Amino acid sequence: MSQLIEQIDKGHLPVHIAVIMDGNGRWAQEKGEDRLFGHYHGVESVRDVVEVCAELGIQYLTLYAFSTENWERPADEVTGLMELLVSTIKKEAEILNRNNIRLHVIGDVGMLPASAQEELNEALELTIKNTGLNLVMALSYSGRWDLENAARKIAQKAKEGLLQPQDITGEVLKQNLSTADFPDPELMIRTSGEYRISNFLLYELAYSELYFTDVRWPDFRKNNLYEAILNFQNRQRRFGKTSVRVQK
Ligand code: IPE
Ligand code: IPE
Ligand code: MG
């Protein structure tokens, strides 16, 4: 059997892949370990997925790393995740840079500990000129948070007389989201057997193809991503039209 990667049609790749990296806690608990053990191993999967996207020439990869709701987890888990975030960025920023990868962050970054904000800012600055893969980390992010934020920004502009209600188009809404600079994802992957969106890119996922796998995030490796992309390539995206219309 040929390698999975060879089966991928390089002319029909998603421009933007988004991932809900789920199942770290259960993966660890199934091994009799602490949940944080799962988060640490999840970083290895992040590395694999970033490498594949960079190699294939995917332009955008958005990773849901920490949601607005995740702040309500036990304090030791939240602290552990923040420490992991700081140490990972410290370790990986140079590697991202060497591989021409540009880092972006979406979410309520002001909520993160100062050390995490500092590391992130350094990495954002370091990679700002890179032209390869755009790696978007969703941190303290939720789709509703972003929509609420956009509504506030638009209301402020209207109050200042810069916008009239009739000017508020889909384009204006998009420009006021934290994802303004990124195209909508064509493919959204969620690991660990949960079939929900959990407040991820609520506006942007309108026509994304959804791919769910039972594999827990720390076990999700290169071949799993190739499988997801191959599955995507065998689907027909219709955007509300009929098959015949789509083929035109
Ligand atoms: C995903 O894994 C990582 C984060 C949400 C930070 P979980 O921690 O949600 O793992 P499960 O779903 O409890 O197994
Ligand atoms: C979604 O996973 C958030 C991230 C992966 C960062 P959760 O584990 O927090 O979502 P629920 O609780 O299963 O909906
Ligand atoms: Mg989970």
Image (cartoon, rainbow, N blue to C red):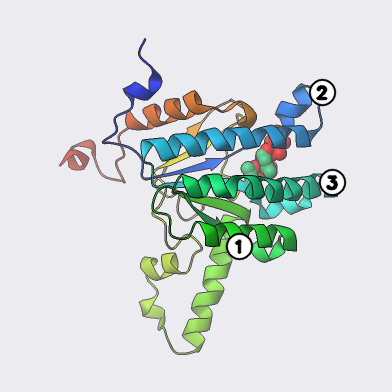
Q: How many marks?
A: 3
**x 40%, y 49%: residue:** 132
Image mark for residue 32:
2
How would you rate the neighbour count of disc 1 (Cα within 10 Å): few for under 14, some for 14-19, many for 20 or more? some
Kind of element beneath mark 3: helix
**x 64%, y 45%: residue:** 91
Kind of element beneath mark 2: loop
Of residue 200 and residue 27, the one placed in the foreground of this image is 27
Pointer 3 or 2: first along the chain: 2
Pointer 2 or 1: first along the chain: 2
Kind of element beneath mark 1: helix
Of residue 58 and residue 143, the one placed in the foreground of this image is 58
Q: Identify the residue under disc 1.
A: 121
> Label 3 to label 2, Cα distance in Å?
18 Å
Task: Locate residue 176 relative to residue 57 in the image: left or right.
Answer: right
Tell me the quarter of the image containing the C terminus: top left
- Amino acid type of disc 1? Asn
> Label 2 to label 1, Cα distance in Å?
36 Å
The relative height of residue 165 versus residue 108 in the rendered view (above or below) is below
